Image (spheres, rainbow, N blue to C red):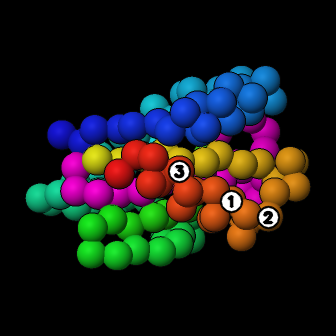
Amino acid sequence: MIRFLYHEGAEKEIVAQERRFRHLREALKIFERLCEKQFDPTEPQQVIAPAKLHRITQNDLWTMWKIELVIPKSGLRPNQFPRMWFVVKGDIIAVLCLGSHADNYEDIERNRAALERLSDII
């Protein structure tokens, strides 16, 4: 069983994005179900398309990923979906950051923020 953690900063970003995306919490539940299969420590199965999941960095202990978070019933095109940064360490998945292109974020800044938040969790 995989445990999901949400960094305090990511929780704030989720709350802020909920104003724009009504079904964001539903998308997060779907994300968790997919991750339970994709990152299962004993029997992983590829259920997330490689085009939607991007490895940012890794070391011997953890791997940081960025995913395009598909929001149901949003009417968004795939390139408009928010991006979410998370880390996988064994049976723990920690959500670190969430950003939308509508907020005009920079990938480098979000990667840096995710790495800083990672040290708070792991």
How would you rate the neighbour count of disc 1 (Cα within 10 Å): few for under 14, some for 14-19, many for 20 or more? some
- Mark 2 and 1 residues: CB-CB less than 8 Å, in contact? yes
* Residue 77, x across and y down, in percent: 78, 52
Residue that carries the numbered disc 3 in the rendered image: 117
For the point 47% across and 74% down, the residue is 57
Q: Looking at the image, which residue is at 65% across and 46% down?
A: 98
Q: Which residue is mark 2?
A: 106
Q: Residue sitting at 46 percent across and 54 percent down?
A: 118
- Front label number (3 vs 2): 3
Q: Say what amino acid the circle numbered 2 marks.
A: Glu
Magenta stretch: give its range. Answer: 71-91
Place of residue 1 in the rendered image (x, y in percent of width and height, measured from the top left): 18, 40
Tag 3: Cα neighbours inside 10 Å, few (<14), some, or many (≥20)? many
Q: Which residue is mark 1?
A: 110
Q: Outermost residue toward the left?
A: 42
Q: Examine the rendered structure and indicate whether residue 100 appears above or below residue 105.
A: above
- Say what secondary structure mark 1 lies in: helix
Which amino acid, by three-letter code, is at mark 1? Arg
- Up-down relation of residue 19 to residue 96 (above or below): above
Spot occupied by residue 48 in the image (x, y as percentages of width and height): 44, 59
Local SS, label 2: loop
Q: Amino acid at mark 3?
A: Arg
The front one of 44 and 92 is: 92
Q: Is residue 103 above or below residue 6?
A: below
> Could you say where residue 68 lies in the image, as x and y percent from the top left?
62, 55
Q: In the shown orientation, is residue 59 left or right of residue 95?
A: left
111 in relation to 10, above or below: below
